[in-house]
Amino acid sequence: MEGNSLQKLETERYPNAVSDEVHTLTTKVRALEDEINELKKDIQAIDFLQKKPLISGDTISVCGFWIVAALAVIGIFF
């Protein structure tokens, strides 16, 4: 019987410090999760607002090649 009462006293005494630590760590983790979510939203907004080219460089180079080829063919026959 006395052994059980000692265990109850120890579990009542120590968990307060541990539960306080767990509580503070949990609040810090929640704050960090909120900050991460805000940063993700900011990154998505930046990606959305960033100007993207309508025509890629590859398309321009292929079109340029065909224009030069057409001009060469016209120059040869005229």
Image (cartoon, rainbow, N blue to C red):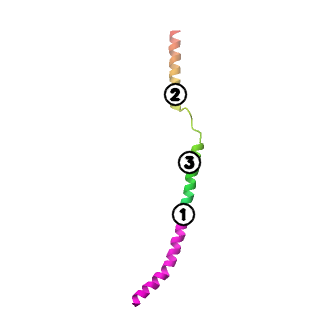
Give above or below for 42 relative to 28. above
Cβ atoms under marks 3 and 2 closer than 8 Å:
no
Q: Is residue 12 magenta?
A: yes
Q: Which mark is residue 58?
A: none
Q: Which residues are magenta?
A: 1-30
Badge nearest the viewer, 1 or 2 = 1
Image x and y of residue 70, in percent: 51, 17
Between disc 1 and disc 2, whose residue precedes?
1
Image x and y of residue 20, in percent: 53, 74
Real-space Cα separation, disc 3 to disc 1, in angstroms:
21 Å
The secondary structure making up most of the magenta span is helix
Residue drawn at x 58%, y 51% is 42
Give above or below for 21 relative to 7. above
Real-space Cα separation, disc 3 to disc 2, in angstroms:
31 Å
Which quadrant does the N terminus fall into? bottom left
Count every numbered label the image shows and give the total: 3
Which type of secondary structure does the marked residue at label 1 adopt? helix
Looking at the rendered structure, the kind of residue marked 3 is Gln
Front residue of 14/74: it is: 14
Q: Which mark is residue 61?
A: 2
Image x and y of residue 10, in percent: 46, 83
Looking at the rendered structure, the kind of residue marked 1 is Arg
Tag 1 residue? 30
Residue drawn at x 53%, y 12% is 75
Tag 3 residue? 44
The extreme top residue here reads 78
Give above or below for 42 relative to 69. below
Which type of secondary structure does the marked residue at label 2 adopt? helix
Looking at the rendered structure, the kind of residue marked 2 is Ser
Between disc 3 and disc 2, whose residue precedes?
3
Q: Viewed as shown, does residue 2 lie left or right of 39?
A: left
